[in-house]
């Protein structure tokens, strides 16, 4: 059992293969945090220090003891209402209008297996792979009961946390702030690593020193957003990719979120991740339960690469589900950059014919196939086939494509609607819009109110009508705007709408997965605007970015790799010059970058040369051979493309027998100096043979001095080398 309880000390010990987590219930019933770090069974209770800090309040029941204050003690689940002035995990508004609560220990349970959450994504595991700890806290005045859920997955070095807030009283209460994860550190000098961005340039790496202030990230957009990712890292200032202690929090939620790191007056650091508190005022009626989204926690003393390895394993094995969790993913071509809205059946069939000859095995029909959809100003919400535009029934087109030996996929944007659509004209009250005010448009479209079951059901039925009558094996699920006008025409409380919207989205996706298990869903939100662990529970891959420029993608995919496995990253080869940046790169360079993902193509095959077609054939065959190593091997970041002359990364098989080295030279200068890149994760004492040249390399030399990159006068020169242990 990975969870132990010491009755005498009233302490809990959670153990993974390389980490330990400790907490205790003190004499007043407060649940105090003691330790999270390197695996040990030794008690950390001595870290609790008591002194009169001045202007730090004291709970009433400690009497005249001014040394006891929740304002400075490390806590498991800090809440407003017991004297803690720091950032807290929970804030409630009581039935009498007062705010706050005072939570004390009531009971706990330990059992085998991993808890699940109703209507929410959560890490899952077999009974022998995880254990669960449930700790119940209660406020005796308001009868608010809080159950903190801990899931321990020893092999992944991951501990999950979620919270259930139950109203046991007689009056309605409101949850106005809720975060499942909190880590308190009584000492340490830290940096916080976060991933900021914008549309077409997501998840840029940023490392900020934590001083006496609060570092805050989050999204107010109703989606996890392009602008900040709901995953952050706290690292010792000296931590590098390969050595040093670091901690990760990753939120399994696809809506607004808030993450903070605060260094307080006593030089202690608190890290919290949970729901966005702005526009949250969730009513909890007597007897009802509010579910706080789950957070994955992980600790590594083997640097940032070790931390990423933990998260990658957990997501691949315990978040992604279904047939495509480890199964074969298609190498596809998407019609968007080939034809945009100007599609018809004959053109799509020609694209499929060209593609199948090159080894590509799926055609995806992107935007423009439905309703009156000739541009992005109209048609959204009318999910019926425009046969006049296609020139044939959809089933006929799919039969023709399938007859080539190709699979068929389709694009949907179920959450949005155009004002120029049949759906909007029939049901204008189904959109998010504040009565009496003109709504804020984005991409000239509005958001459907997915907090309402009848809206979700109606759109779901439209999609099912397409899926039931056509052999579709892939859905690209898009969402191309944030939520601004937060108002539901049927909600009794508007402070619940954004949270319920996400539950409606999850319900929709769960039904699709359950009823159409043969369909692979790729998540997308203007590219990577909703790239989070919550979506990966329903969509095992996500389109990484609308920006397919290989050089920008190096940085986007670098930032993504800190928290998410390569098998989840949608990455394609597109045209050159690139449609988003105008930059020109070689076909080979674009291929090497796109191979660090699910791989496919976004271009018009009728406009490329025979030489480029031969390149596609080579790339497809190469990827098929390398795919097990890419998707299942351990991923290493070898350089930082935001700072170094070369972007380099590597995959190593679990047995360390196979190694795939990839690099793209970002800068070229006159009289260029030699570039050496140190490899990682090789077997000590082994000799590796490079497959193309047959040249032998000692592991120690590759890791200590590095691999010299062949010089050459070429912009954005690429390198890809496969090594096999002798």
Image (spheres, helix red, strand yellow):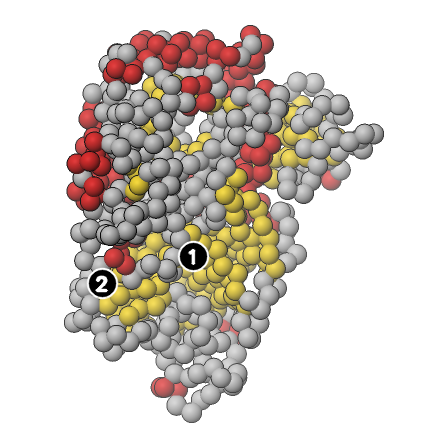
The crowding category of the residue bearing disc 1, from other C-alpha atoms within 10 Å (few below 14, some 14 to 19, many at least 20), is many
Judge from the rendering whether residue 477 lies leftward or rightward of residue 721; answer left or right.
Answer: left
Expressed as whole percent of the image width and height from the top left, the position of residue 131 reads 36, 53
Residue at 52% in and 79% down: 49
Taking the image as shown, residue 632 lies to the left or right of residue 121, namely right
* Mark 2 element type: strand
With 265 as the anchor, is 503 left or right in this view?
Answer: left
**Vertical arrangement, residue 688 with respect to residue 417, above or below:** above
Relative vertical location of residue 167 with respect to residue 693 in this rendering, above or below: below
Quarter of the image where the N terminus is located: bottom left
Q: Residue at x 40, y 9 (%)?
A: 350
Q: Nearer the viewer, residue 64 or 79?
A: 79
Q: Tag 1's secondary structure?
A: strand
Which numbered tag is attached to residue 284?
A: 2
* Badge count: 2
Q: Which residue is mark 1?
A: 258
- Residue 28 versus residue 486: which sits nearer the camera? 486
Residue sitting at 60 percent across and 27 percent down?
A: 583
User: Which quadrant holds residue 680?
Assistant: top right
Figure quadrant of residue 683: top right
Q: Is residue 59 above or below residue 187?
A: below
């Amino acid at each position: 059992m990975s969870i132990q309880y010491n009755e005498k000390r009233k302490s809990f010990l959670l153990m993974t293969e390389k980490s330990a987590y400790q907490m205790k219930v003190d004499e007043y019933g407060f649940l105090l945090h003691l330790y999270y770090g390197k695996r040990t069974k030794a008690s950390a209770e001595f870290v609790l220090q008591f002194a009169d800090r001045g202007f730090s309040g004291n709970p009433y029941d400690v009497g005249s003891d001014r040394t006891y204050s929740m304002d400075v003690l490390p806590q498991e689940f800090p809440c407003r209402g017991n004297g803690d002035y720091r950032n807290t995990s929970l804030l409630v508004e009581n039935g009498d209008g007062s705010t706050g609560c005072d939570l004390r220990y009531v009971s706990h349970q330990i059992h085998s297996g991993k808890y699940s959450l109703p209507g929410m994504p959560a890490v899952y595991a077999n009974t022998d792979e995880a254990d669960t700890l449930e700790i119940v806290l209660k406020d005796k005045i308001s009868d608010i009961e809080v159950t903190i859920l801990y899931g321990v997955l020893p092999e992944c070095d991951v501990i999950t946390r979620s919270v259930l807030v139950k109203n046991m009283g007689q009056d309605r209460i409101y949850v106005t702030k809720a975060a499942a994860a909190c880590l308190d550190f009584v000492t340490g000098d830290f940096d916080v690593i976060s991933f900021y961005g914008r549309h077409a340039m997501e998840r840029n790496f940023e490392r900020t020193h934590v001083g006496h202030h609060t570092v805050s990230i989050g999204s107010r957009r109703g989606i996890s957003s392009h602008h900040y990712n709901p995953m952050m890292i706290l690292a010792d200032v000296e931590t590098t990719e390969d050595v040093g202690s670091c901690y990760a929090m990753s939120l399994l939620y696809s809506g607004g979120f808030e993450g903070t790191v605060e260094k307080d007056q006593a030089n202690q650091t608190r890290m919290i991740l949970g729901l966005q508190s702005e526009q949250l005022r969730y009513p909890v009626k007597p007897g009802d339960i509010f579910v706080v989204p789950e957070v994955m926690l992980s600790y590594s003393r083997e640097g940032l690469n070790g931390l990423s390895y933990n998260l990658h394993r957990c997501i691949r094995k315990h978040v992604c589900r279904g047939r495509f969790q480890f199964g074969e993913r298609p190498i596809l071509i998407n019609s968007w950059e080939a034809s945009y809205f100007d599609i018809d059946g004959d053109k799509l069939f020609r694209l499929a014919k060209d593609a199948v000859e090159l080894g590509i095995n799926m055609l995806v029909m992107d935007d423009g196939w439905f309703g009156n959809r000739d541009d992005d100003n109209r048609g959204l919400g009318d999910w019926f086939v425009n046969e006049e535009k296609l020139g044939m029934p959809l089933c006929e087109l799919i039969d023709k494509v399938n007859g080539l030996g190709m699979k068929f996929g389709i694009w949907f944007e179920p959450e949005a609607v155009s004002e120029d659509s049949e759906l909007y004209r029939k049901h204008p009250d189904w959109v998010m819009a504040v009565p009496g005010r003109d709504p804020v448009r984005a991409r000239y479209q509005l958001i459907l109110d997915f907090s309402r079951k009848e809206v979700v059901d109606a759109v779901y039925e439209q999609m099912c009508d397409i899926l039931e009558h056509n052999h579709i094996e892939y859905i690209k699920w898009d969402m191309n705007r944030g939520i601004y006008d937060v108002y539901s025409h049927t909600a009794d409380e508007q402070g619940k709408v954004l949270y319920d919207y996400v539950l409606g989205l999850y319900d929709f996706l769960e039904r699709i997965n359950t009823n159409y298990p043969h369909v692979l869903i790729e998540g997308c939100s203007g590219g990577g605007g909703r790239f989070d662990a919550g979506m990966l529970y329903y969509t095992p891959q996500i389109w990484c970015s609308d920006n397919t420029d290989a050089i920008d993608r190096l940085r986007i995919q670098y930032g993504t790799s800190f928290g998410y496995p390569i098998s989840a990253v949608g990455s394609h080869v597109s045209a050159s010059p690139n449609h988003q940046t105008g930059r020109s790169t070689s076909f080979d360079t674009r291929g090497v970058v796109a191979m660090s993902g699910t791989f496919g193509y976004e271009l018009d095959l009728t406009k490329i040369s025979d030489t480029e077609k031969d390149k596609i054939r080579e790339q497809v065959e190469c990827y098929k051979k390398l795919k097990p190593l890419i998707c299942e091997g351990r991923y290493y970041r070898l350089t930082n493309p935001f700072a170094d002359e070369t972007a380099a990364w590597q995959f190593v098989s679990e047995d360390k027998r196979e190694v795939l080295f990839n690099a793209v030279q970002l800068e070229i200068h006159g009289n260029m100096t030699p570039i050496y890149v140190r490899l990682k994760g090789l077997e000590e004492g082994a000799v590796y043979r490079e497959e193309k040249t047959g040249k032998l390399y000692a592991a120690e030399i590759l890791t200590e001095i590095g691999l010299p990159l062949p010089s050459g006068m070429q912009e954005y020169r690429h390198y890809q080398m496969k090594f096999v242990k002798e």
